[in-house]
Image (cartoon, grey):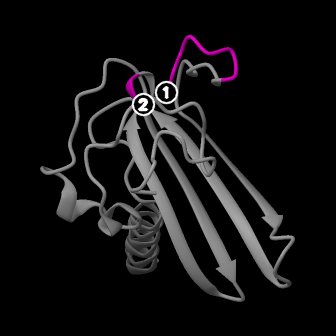
Amino acid sequence: MLQNFTTKNRGPQKRIAEPKVYDNFCDLDVWILKRKGTVECDGACFKWQQIIDNSGSYSYMTMRSCYNEMFDMKDPLTAPEPDDFYCSSKSSPLDCIPDVNLIDNICWCQGDYCNEAVAKKLSNGFFLSILITVFLFELS
């Protein structure tokens, strides 16, 4: 996505700005980029991620930014910024290659470091559920 970022057809449209960081660490756990990639947003933080699932082998493309700075809000084709936290996911087969799926994830959020990696959120939730289970087991 580095070349012709604002005009490339892949990803949400209509982009008018470059992201602050081009880095593969943006795909999964973003802790290493926390200082380097941090931006203050007047509106919603935005994350788009496209995952190519080739029979369990994953290839990622991710962008994170302030929604109102990355996209042309005056263009009627640009989706309006939601009022609160919202995520969606869509999976579709890749027509040109059998057994390959495209997974598009989009999230808007408000707050400090709110658009972190889904894998990190899942691992935090898993850890918390294990901790609660152990605690309940000790009580019984």
* Label 2 – label 1 distance at C-alpha: 4 Å
Q: Is residue 104 left or right of residue 117?
A: right
Q: Which residue is mark 1?
A: 71
Task: State the SS at label 2.
Answer: helix
What x and y, as percent, mark residue 7? 53, 41
In the rendered structure, which amino acid carries the disc numbered 2? Met
Q: Residue at x 66, y 55 (%)?
A: 104
Q: Is residue 48 magenta?
A: no
Dot label at residue 88:
none
Checking the image for residue 70, the label placed there is 2
**Label 1 Cα crowd, 10 Å radius (few <14 / some 14-19 / many 20+):** many
Which residue range is magenta in the image?
A: 69-77
Looking at the image, residue 8 sits to the left or right of residue 17; the answer is right
Residue 114, image quadrant: top left
| Along the line of sight, the residue nearer the viewer: 128 or 140 | 128
Q: Where is residue 19, by image quadrant?
A: top left
CB-based contact (under 8 Å), mark 2 and mark 1 = yes
The residue closer to the viewer here, 140 or 123, is 123
Residue placed most toward the observer, 54 or 82: 54
**Residue at image coords 59%, 45%:** 106
